[in-house]
Image (cartoon, helix red, strand yellow):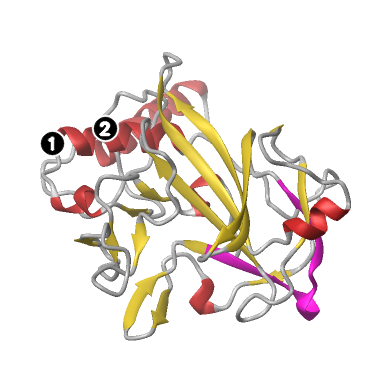
Amino acid sequence: MNNKYTLNYTFVLILVLTVGCGGSNSSNVNTDPVIINNNDDSENISTLYQDFLTPNYYLLEANDSFILETNKFLINARKQQFHHPFEDKNGNKPYTSTPNNSKFTAEKNTGNVTLHHSAVDLYLQNAKTSVNIYAAHDGYISTTKLSGKYRHYLSITKDVNNIKGVTIGKLVTIYAHIDLDLDESEQIWMNNIYVNKGELISKHLYANTAGGPHLHFEIRYYRLNDDGTETFYGIGGPMGNPNLTQSSAGDYSFGAWDPEVGYGFGNPENHGLFFY
């Protein structure tokens, strides 16, 4: 093909892609967006891998200021491509499995209430508990041992900035059902430590986790002034957290939320992690 036809073909292809993907949403937002260009102020968004977001995102009009704020956050947060939590510096990682009820947004029955799983559970072969766990991204670590929901867990928090360098929210990954006591017995003290992407953060899964030892890997999206509370989603009503007052929405309509906290939960696939 000569240069003239090559240039014409390229122009037509670009035109078709632009027309097919461009334009701002004008109806209620029922799915969530992914960036299609590098302009973080663009409203030209489309759907790729759906996240699990606060009900307001699905219930408000598409041009509502909260929707636009959320979209700008998501576009910038999704620029962060993650390191696999079990992958060493040579690219090696153990075989893991994820049962259907442990995948992102899978239905999980808790008593008489059906919830959707806001994370991915990674199981090692032979119920193995000794495994190196690495930071999916850089940020500051916090460790918790008194969690009723997760028992021991470790979280890494990173600021999300727009292209002007202004912080517009926080991205948090949670590594739950680890054994911090065993880590500390090996002199692995991570609380309030800054880590880089791919650095070792733990060596032990908790042996007695319900369903068997596994890593509960969770991505949370927080607004700038959110305090990172553990329980902004779960079982609402008298038997649950009274602050969880609003039913979830979108494709995942079970459970309840504190609508004043958080943008929601991120799909690992939007950060380059394909676990199954």
The answer to whether residue 111 is left or right of residue 274 is left
Say which residue appears at 11% left-offset and 44% top-offset: 61
Q: Amino acid at mark 2?
A: Glu
- Identify the image quadrant of the C terminus: bottom right
Q: Which residues are magenta?
A: 120-134
Task: Give me the C-alpha separation between circle 1 and circle 2.
Answer: 10 Å
- On the image, which quarter does residue 106 sit in? bottom left
Marks 1 and 2, the one that precedes in the sequence = 1
265 relative to 6, above or below: below
* Image location (x, y in percent) of residue 77: 45, 36
Residue 106 belongs to magenta span: no
Secondary structure state at the residue bearing disc 1: loop
57 relative to 74, above or below: below
The answer to whether residue 211 is left or right of residue 186 is left
- On the image, which quarter does residue 227 sit in? top left
* Farthest-out residue, right: 186
Q: How many marks?
A: 2
Which residue corresponds to mark 1? 63
* Image location (x, y in percent) of residue 186: 88, 52
Secondary structure state at the residue bearing disc 2: helix
| Disc marking residue 54 | none
Which residue corresponds to mark 2? 69
Q: Nearer the viewer, mark 1 or mark 2?
A: 2
* Image location (x, y in percent) of residue 84: 68, 51
Say which residue appears at 40% left-offset and 40% top-offset: 222
- Badge 2: few (under 14), some or many (20 or more) residues near its Cα, within 10 Å? some
Q: Amino acid at mark 1?
A: Asn
The answer to whether residue 205 is left or right of residue 141 is right
* Image location (x, y in percent) of residue 16: 30, 37
The answer to whether residue 120 is left or right of residue 162 is right
* Farthest-out residue, top: 164
